[in-house]
Image (cartoon, rainbow, N blue to C red):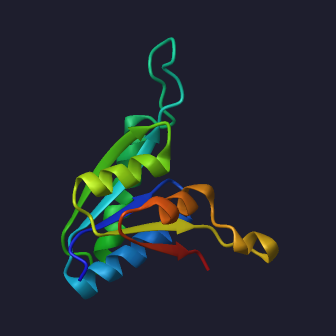
Amino acid sequence: MTKRILCAIDETDHAKSAVIEAAELCSLTGAPLTICTVNVLQGGMRGPPIYLHADKEIDKILADAESLAGKYGAKQSSKVTLSSRDIATAIIQYAEQNGFDHIVAGAGHHRGLSRLILGSVASDIVARAHCSVTIAMRP
């Protein structure tokens, strides 16, 4: 039985599908939802760290996702921001270290041959996660 759900999002449209899927799963199982995003570290090798998003952008991404989750049945949710150069690794490590037993992530709609290949982050999560993973596809 699913006890803790981690929903990994970013600022893209397919993240909304992941939030909806995760919220509906929470509604069915009664599991609490944690919504996470990774602020990608782009600089910092020889200078100060430079992140992809400003704190205000991250706060808006998470607040919008939490609001959407509530509309789709997530009764209990929390938010977390991770920082890393590798998005999939950050999500997987956080999930494992914090006892999550299900990860939900989104992937865009693909046509033709590209349908056979998930996005690299979603693919990495599926391949390396210690727990069940649901990939929500945007219609």
Location of residue 13 by image quarter? bottom right
Decide if residue 118 is in sight here: yes
State the residue lying farthest toward the bottom. 28
Q: Quadrant of the N terminus?
A: bottom left
Left or right: 120, with 128 as reference point: right
Residue for point 39% across, 54% down: 92
Residue 72 visible in this rendered orientation of the protein: no
Viewer-nearest residue: 89 or 9: 89
Query: Vertically, is 50 above or below 7?
Result: above
Task: Please state the horizontal and vertical placement of residue 100, each as a whole percent of the image.
Answer: 26, 64
Q: Residue at x 41, y 62 (%)?
A: 129
Total marks placed: 0
Q: Relative to 133, is 64 above or below?
A: above
Q: Residue furthest top?
A: 46
In the figure, is residue 61 to the left or right of 66? right
Rendered-image quadrant of the C terminus? bottom right
Q: Nearer the viewer, residue 84 or 124?
A: 124
Which of the pair 9/133 is nearer the observer?
133
Where does the image place residue 82, in percent across and percent down from the top left? Answer: 36, 43
Residue at 43% of width from left, 38% of height from top? 84
Q: Residue 112: image x %, image y %?
A: 81, 76
Residue lying at 49% horizontally and 12% vertically, measured from the top left: 47
